[in-house]
Image (cartoon, rainbow, N blue to C red):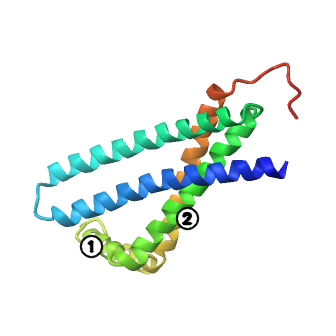
Amino acid sequence: MTEKKNIMWESAGKAGLVLGGVSIVYLLLTMLLGKVAENGSAILMGLVNGLLWLAKFIACIYLMRLFMRKFAAAEPEADRNRVFRFGMITALLSALLYSAFYLAYVSFIAPDTFSQALDVLADNPMMDSNAMSAVEEMIPRMPTISFFGNLIYCWLFGTILSAIFSASIRPQNPFTDNQ
């Protein structure tokens, strides 16, 4: 039984590495494009970023389905629940990788990310001094908050995908004894 768990974790680790890598490449591309095209058209940059996000979104869905199908083909005795757990573990590991990279990015590579967002927010006439002071107090905690926010969001998204795909990859057999 532990050998089967190790196979599942090893396969999920590889799949999570690829899925997390896709999201990291997307993040790096958008950050790089933002630096390169600072004087460019905002509409064009918005369109390019939107297309990149759509490509990442579709690639992640496709890859999750592909990895779950590969796992189900490699493990013919795996039922729907085992395929679902594989998808959940894959989602967790990819979310952990992406969230850790984002935390490192906003903490070390571009530590002024949230300060720049605060500067944009300061220009908003709807923000009074009390709201601005509350936001300023949150700035030091934003890397940690964004880490856990990304982790939860990515893991939930992957878990929902796993639930959808596991039902179609391995239909429930009513004649087996599921416990």
Quadrant that contains the C terminus? top right
Q: Which residue is nearer to you in this view: 154 or 121?
A: 154
Q: Position of residue 33 (x, y in %)?
A: 23, 60
- Of residue 90 and residue 140, the one placed in the foreground of this image is 90
Name the residue rendered at 58%, 50% in the picture. 91
Circle 1: element type:
helix
Left or right of 174: which side holds 128? left
Residue 88 visible to an observer of this rendering: yes
Towards the viewer: 149 or 97: 97
Residue occupying image coordinates x 41% and y 59%: 24
Q: Report the amino acid beneath label 2.
A: Phe
Q: Which residue is mark 2?
A: 148
Q: Which residue is mark 1?
A: 122
Q: Which mark is residue 94?
A: none
Tag 2–tag 1 contact (CB < 8 Å): no
Locate residue 83 relative to residue 25 in the image: left or right: right
Callout 1 environment at 10 Å: few (<14), some (14 to 19), or many (20+)? Answer: some
Instruction: Point out residue 17 in the picture as x, y percentages from the top left corner.
Output: 53, 55
- View extreme (top): residue: 175
As helix, strand or loop, the secondary structure at mark 2 comes to: helix
